[in-house]
Image (spheres, helix red, strand yellow):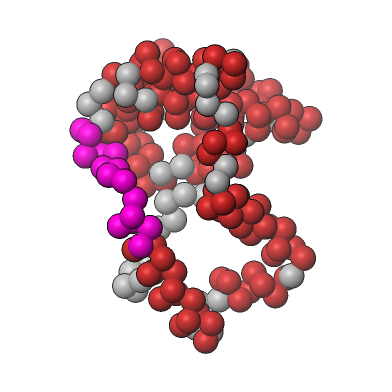
């Protein structure tokens, strides 16, 4: 909005095929900072395997603590660190195989999504309850239909259409959406409307403190 250009911070993280790849796509500024200012000073990959594993655990432990002073964040960091170790020890050779592409993606998504349960939970017990509800729906009174209201359906529809389908059907659309050398008239009309709608949504929303304020 103000003309600043920042390095890309998220690069389609949910297209990942491993947790290691996920962290090269997710919160790139954070992972790069920990790599350059903690992992490499600790010795990085220039040590024996035992020390490399310890360095990785320290980095992901620090990543969890960085997000908040709670056992859930600590567990979340160690959780991701454990998967990084497993991939480094033996999983990587399977995940990199072309015939394992679908399995690798499902594995990565399942690991990431299960991790988010603890990231957002207030306690470890609550996180376990969330997982229990995910895999045993009958254990919860909630049903997915409760949450699929019109705004959610609208967001899902737009997400599916613009994740590549419309760009493939209309090649010129991608050029229009990504061309920063010119501003179209419809952008002058649409952007203020979207801004007003966003402000209305924020004002009407319930109290939702910024997650890092919980530290």
Spot occupied by residue 118 in the image (x, y as percentages of width and height): 40, 23
Q: Confirm whether the magenta stretch covers residue 203.
A: yes
Is 33 or 201 nearer to us in this picture?
Answer: 201
- Does 100 sit left or right of 32 as displayed? right
Q: Which residues are magenta?
A: 200-215
Image vertical order of residue 94 relative to residue 101, above or below = above
Q: Is residue 124 above or below residue 176?
A: above
Residue at the (73%, 70%) spot, across then down:
171
Total numbered circles: 0
Q: Is residue 190 above or below residue 136?
A: below
Q: Position of residue 72 (x, y in %)?
A: 33, 21
Pick the front one: 144 or 109: 144
Is 19 colored magenta in this rendering?
no
Percent position of residue 137, x then y:
59, 19
Res 48 → quadrant: top left
Q: Residue at x 77, y 65 (%)?
A: 169
Q: Is residue 157 left or right of residue 8?
A: right
Q: Residue at x 46, y 42 (%)?
A: 26
Q: x%, y% of residue 172? A: 70, 75
């Amino acid at each position: 909005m103000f003309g600043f250009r920042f390095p890309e911070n998220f690069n389609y993280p949910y297209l990942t095929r491993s947790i290691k790849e996920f962290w090269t796509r997710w919160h790139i500024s954070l992972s790069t900072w920990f790599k350059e200012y903690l992992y490499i000073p600790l010795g990085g990959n220039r040590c024996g395997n035992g020390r490399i594993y310890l360095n990785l655990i320290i980095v992901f432990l620090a990543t969890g603590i960085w997000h908040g002073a709670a056992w859930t964040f600590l567990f979340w960091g160690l959780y991701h660190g454990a998967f990084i170790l497993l991939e480094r020890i033996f999983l990587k050779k399977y995940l990199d195989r072309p015939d394992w592409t679908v399995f690798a993606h499902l594995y990565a998504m399942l690991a990431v999504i299960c991790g988010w349960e603890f990231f957002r939970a207030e306690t470890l017990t609550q996180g376990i309850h969330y997982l229990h509800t995910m895999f045993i729906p009958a254990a919860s009174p909630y049903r997915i239909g409760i949450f699929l209201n019109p705004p959610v359906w609208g967001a899902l529809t737009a997400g599916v259409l613009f994740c590549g389908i419309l760009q493939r059907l209309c090649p010129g659309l991608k050029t229009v959406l990504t061309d920063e050398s010119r501003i179209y008239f419809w952008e002058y009309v649409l952007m203020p409307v979207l801004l007003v709608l966003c402000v209305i949504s924020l004002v009407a929303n319930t109290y939702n403190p910024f997650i890092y304020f919980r530290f």
